[in-house]
Image (cartoon, rainbow, N blue to C red):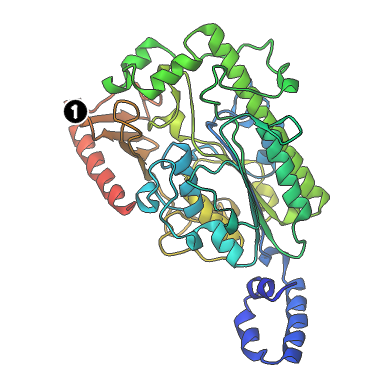
């Protein structure tokens, strides 16, 4: 155990460092610290972290959320052993920005990445930066999408994305999900055993390979899955739902419409694409199971916080759209499953409906590690919601949040959107078109009746607009 590791493993460090002024005393103090660490009660030990972070995967694309097609037995098992949040959401539904919010615990307005560039928040204020400073062995494998990958900031860092099949020097090619598995296992098997660890497995799946006409390219051994099982078409995959969108989202130049034609514009294509998409999901699920099994073999699963979630939701042809970006439910809601060894046995298998956001992941991970959060981190540690479910958190948990998305390329392609999101109401403003939407989600959960022009809802519209502006200012 190194001096740096000891410095971060016990609250007595500062005192010990102050009195250890000779080599002999340092040696004595080192032995004392080791003894102290070994006698810390299990509940107070800093947890390891395994973050399983998939791509373009909406909230209901796991079996335990009610999906009747996709097979995700390992994620389902995690949910039965932990807690699933069925109203988990992202504050910006696009790969790069959402990942920046994951790392920084901040809204886009604060971290400054509006697309795929490096965020402006100092690395020392990210959760991997803070964990490494505080003695964790920190790894990242897979997708990055925030500018150049800062490999020197990780103890183990390998970044790759954009294609499902990766060329390997002298050995043909490997599927990106298989490479995720191999790299993650290498991290777990070669890590220093005396240090706590944090590993982010950033899957590229189930993201499409955009330039490829086939879009979703699973491994050959998965092709038998779902072969004879028809995938249900979403209730909103209709011309009627398309024409209830804002006019600018209906246009051929809109990216959601362009990608719908790539993937879903015929019944045959829809079935082929969705089956391959679900095959990618099942492949990710299998890797999740392999990594959890490795933690069991190493006897550290009961010391590890395991989180499965994704960077954004996904349109499966709903509203005759594909991909994400826009603040509709299919796009902003994501799966979130947490297995925490601190949970009481009676809480396992529970489902929570609180608004937990991607910005909450960083402070939750830091809290599990016993590391404080920076003052500019905006998310909250959500572990009290499942560790002490009978004790309301103070301050009370959020009942609403601000959603934001910047223009990508042009307003005709992917326009700016801002929204106030509640469980009973959603207000959206498209500033480049000065267009508003107001949905009463209690009676219209599919967001089909825009009430913004309804004179009887004028007061609701004005209140929602004003409240959104307040939350927008707080997000900066």
The residue drawn where x is 70% and y is 50% is: 345
Q: Looking at the image, how many numbered discs can be counted on the residues? A: 1
Along the line of sight, which residue is nearer the eye, 67 or 378? 378
Can you name the residue that lies furthest to the left here?
455
Q: Residue 293, how many percent across, how many down?
A: 78, 43
- Kindly indicate the quadrant of the structure image that contains residue 92: top left
Left or right side of 203 for 42:
right
Left or right side of 17 for 375:
left
Left or right side of 294 for 132:
left
Q: As displayed, is residue 385 above or below residue 406?
A: below
Can you name the residue that lies furthest to the right here?
297
- Kindly indicate the quadrant of the structure image that contains residue 25: bottom right
Q: Residue 127, how many percent across, how many down?
A: 54, 57
Q: As displayed, is residue 457 above or below residue 364?
A: above
Asked if one can make out residue 224 in the rendered structure from this viewpoint, the answer is: yes
Q: Residue 334, how many percent across, how many down?
A: 51, 36
- Kindly indicate the quadrant of the structure image that contains residue 434: top left
Q: As displayed, is residue 352 above or below residue 341?
A: above
Q: Residue 108, how many percent across, how many down?
A: 38, 47
Q: Which residue is mark 1?
A: 456
Asked if one can make out residue 288 in the rendered structure from this viewpoint, the answer is: no
Q: As displayed, is residue 333 above or below residue 129?
A: above
The residue drawn where x is 34% and y is 51% is: 475
Along the line of sight, which residue is nearer the eye, 31 or 468? 31
What element does badge 1 sit on? helix
């Amino acid at each position: 155990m190194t001096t740096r590791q000891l410095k971060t493993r016990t609250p007595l460090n500062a005192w010990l460092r102050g009195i250890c002024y000779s080599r002999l005393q340092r040696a004595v103090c080192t032995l004392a610290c080791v003894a102290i660490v070994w006698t810390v009660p299990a509940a107070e030990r800093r947890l390891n972290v395994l973050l399983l972070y998939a791509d373009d995967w909406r909230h209901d694309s796991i079996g335990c959320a009610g999906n009747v097609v996709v097979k995700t037995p390992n994620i389902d098992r995690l949910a039965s052993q932990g807690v699933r949040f069925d109203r988990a959401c992202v504050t910006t539904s696009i790969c790069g920005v959402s990942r920046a919010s994951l790392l920084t615990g901040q809204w886009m307005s604060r971290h400054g990445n509006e697309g795929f560039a490096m965020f402006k928040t100092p690395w020392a204020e990210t959760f991997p930066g803070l964990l490494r400073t505080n003695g964790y062995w920190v790894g990242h494998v897979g997708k990055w999408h925030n500018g150049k990958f800062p490999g020197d900031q990780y103890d183990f860092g390998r970044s790759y994305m954009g294609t499902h099949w990766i060329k390997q020097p002298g050995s043909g090619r490997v599927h990106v999900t298989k490479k995720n598995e191999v790299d993650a296992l290498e991290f777990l098997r070669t890590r220093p055993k005396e240090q706590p660890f944090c590993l982010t497995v950033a899957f590229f799946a189930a993201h499409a390979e955009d330039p490829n006409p086939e879009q979703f390219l699973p491994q050959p051994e998965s092709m038998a899955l779902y072969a004879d099982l028809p995938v249900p078409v979403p209730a909103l995959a209709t011309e009627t739902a398309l024409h209830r969108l804002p006019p600018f989202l209906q246009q051929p130049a809109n990216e959601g419409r362009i990608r719908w034609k790539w993937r879903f514009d015929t019944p045959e294509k829809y079935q082929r694409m969705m089956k391959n998409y679900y095959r990618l999901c099942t492949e990710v699920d299998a890797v999740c199971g392999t990594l959890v099994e490795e933690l069991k073999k190493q006897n550290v699963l009961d010391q590890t916080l395991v989180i499965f979630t994704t960077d954004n939701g996904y349109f499966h042809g709903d509203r005759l759209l594909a991909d994400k970006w826009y603040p509709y439910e299919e796009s902003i809601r994501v799966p979130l499953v947490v297995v925490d060894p601190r949970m009481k046995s009676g809480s396992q298998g529970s489902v929570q409906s609180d608004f937990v956001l991607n910005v909450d992941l960083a402070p939750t991970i830091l809290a599990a590690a016993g590391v404080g959060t920076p003052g500019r981190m905006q998310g909250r540690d959500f572990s009290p919601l499942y560790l002490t479910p009978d004790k309301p958190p103070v301050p009370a948990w959020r009942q609403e949040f601000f959603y934001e998305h910047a223009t990508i390329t042009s307003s005709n392609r992917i326009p700016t959107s801002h929204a106030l999101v509640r469980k009973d109401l959603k207000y959206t403003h498209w500033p480049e078109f000065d267009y508003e939407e107001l949905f009463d989600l209690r009676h219209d959960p599919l967001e089909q009746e825009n009430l913004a022009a309804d004179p009887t809802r004028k007061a609701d519209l004005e209140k929602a607009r004003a409240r959104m502006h307040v939350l927008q200012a707080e997000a900066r």
